[in-house]
């Protein structure tokens, strides 16, 4: 008897490795996968503008990264004592205007440099709904809990998503010709839009992405959405809000991602890195005991060996942790 729907992920014509730079941009589900890769010591940059959800906001941010465009005070607004940007997540908001601008522009510079050298760009679309400021007609990446009356909400058409995506892909191809791009659609349910509306939104994203991938070289689709909604397809794989995939679900998608795209050396390194992570998370009962001192010595020796074996993996934080 089958308890899971059989699902064969399409093979990819390339593999990535621990030596490669990988940029994640998009919805909060990409943060979950990106965080796992960061924890395992991959060279990853996540959402330089903070979490983004719709294709227009993602394309707009990528074009800004390519142009290395600086932000100025005219692009900030103040609400409830904080300075915000309509192009950034509230992670960048703050009381000090100059501090907010510096944080935004420092992130912009880093994104430009990282994207120029990246091997892989992973774009996760979360919703086909986009918001526009009624006062200026500016597209908004994050509403910052401003009153709904400020915005015009719009469900993007499939053709709009395709057009905007192809436009940014053309710019990316010129900027970094070696870049490979993987699209995913987030399985997070945007139920605030409505259940039927969320389904309609996801359908447009999926159709648009497949249309792009079918006609554009170096672009691929990874089925995060299908793995959660069609393979796992049970609310026990979601958090208590019944909206966000839980840790088990994220681990399952990450495992499928690595099985499909990571090279053999990388799979072995993951095993080694997981041992280091487990050691860091170890909680000793008696820190002054001889047994714990031997444990610390063994971990430092292991880290030094791993640094020699894999010099491209940064274990400086773990080394400091065991030296303190």
Image: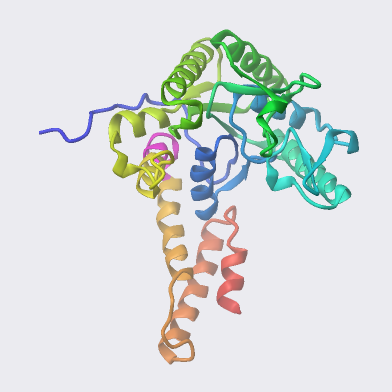
Which of these two is toward me, 197 or 121?
197
Residue 140: x percent and y percent?
A: 70, 28
Which of these two is toward me, 257 or 194?
194
> In the image, is residue 86 part of the stretch drawn in magenta?
no
Residue 226 as seen in the image, left or right of residue 302: left
Residue 31: x percent and y percent?
A: 54, 43
Q: Quadrant of residue 155?
A: top right
Image quarter (top left, top right, bottom left or bottom right) of the N terminus: top left
Residue 287: x percent and y percent?
A: 48, 86
Which of these two is toward me, 248 or 223?
248
Image quarter (top left, top right, bottom left or bottom right) of the C terminus: bottom right
The residue at the point 48 percent across, 73 percent down is 299
Residue 278: x percent and y percent?
A: 42, 66
The residue at the point 69 percent across, 27 percent down is 149
Q: Quadrant of residue 138?
A: top right
Residue sitting farthest toward the left: 1
Does 148 appear above or below 312?
above
> In the image, is residue 257 part of the stretch drawn in magenta?
yes
The residue at the point 34 percent across, 27 percent down is 9
Does 174 appear above or below 82?
above
Q: How many marks?
A: 0
Q: How is the image coloured?
A: rainbow
Q: Main secondary structure of the magenta part?
A: helix
- Residues rendered magenta in the picture: 256-264
Which of these two is toward me, 19 or 172?
172
């Amino acid at each position: 008897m089958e308890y899971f729907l059989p699902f064969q992920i399409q093979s990819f014509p390339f593999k990535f490795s621990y030596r490669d730079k990988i940029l994640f941009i998009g919805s909060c589900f990409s943060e979950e996968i990106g965080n796992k890769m960061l924890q395992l010591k991959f060279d990853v940059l996540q959402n330089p503008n903070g979490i983004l959800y719709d294709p227009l906001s993602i394309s707009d941010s990528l074009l800004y990264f390519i142009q290395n465009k600086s932000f100025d005070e005219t692009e900030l607004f103040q609400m409830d004592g904080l300075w915000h940007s309509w192009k950034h997540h509230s992670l960048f908001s703050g009381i000090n205007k100059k501090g907010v601008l510096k944080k935004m522009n420092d992130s912009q510079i880093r994104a430009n440099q990282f994207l120029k050298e990246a091997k892989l760009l992973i774009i996760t679309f979360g919703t086909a709904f986009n918001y526009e400021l009624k006062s200026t007609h500016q597209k908004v990446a994050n509403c910052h809990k401003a009153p709904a009356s400020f915005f015009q909400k719009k469900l993007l058409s499939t053709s709009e998503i395709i057009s905007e995506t192809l436009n940014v892909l053309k710019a990316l191809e010129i900027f970094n010709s070696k870049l490979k791009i993987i699209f995913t659609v987030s399985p997070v349910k945007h139920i605030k839009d409505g259940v039927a509306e969320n389904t309609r939104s996801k359908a447009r994203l999926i159709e648009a992405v497949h249309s792009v991938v079918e006609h554009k070289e170096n672009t691929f689709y990874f089925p995060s959405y299908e793995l959660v909604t069609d393979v796992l397809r049970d609310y026990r794989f979601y958090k208590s809000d019944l909206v966000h995939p839980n840790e088990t679900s994220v681990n399952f998608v990450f495992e499928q991602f690595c099985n499909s795209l990571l090279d053999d050396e990388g799979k072995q390194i993951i095993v080694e890195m997981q041992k280091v992570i487990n050691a860091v998370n170890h909680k000793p009962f008696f820190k002054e005991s001889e047994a714990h001192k031997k444990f610390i010595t063994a971990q430092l020796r292991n880290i030094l060996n791993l640094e020699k074996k894999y010099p491209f993996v940064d274990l400086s934080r773990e080394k400091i942790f065991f030296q303190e």
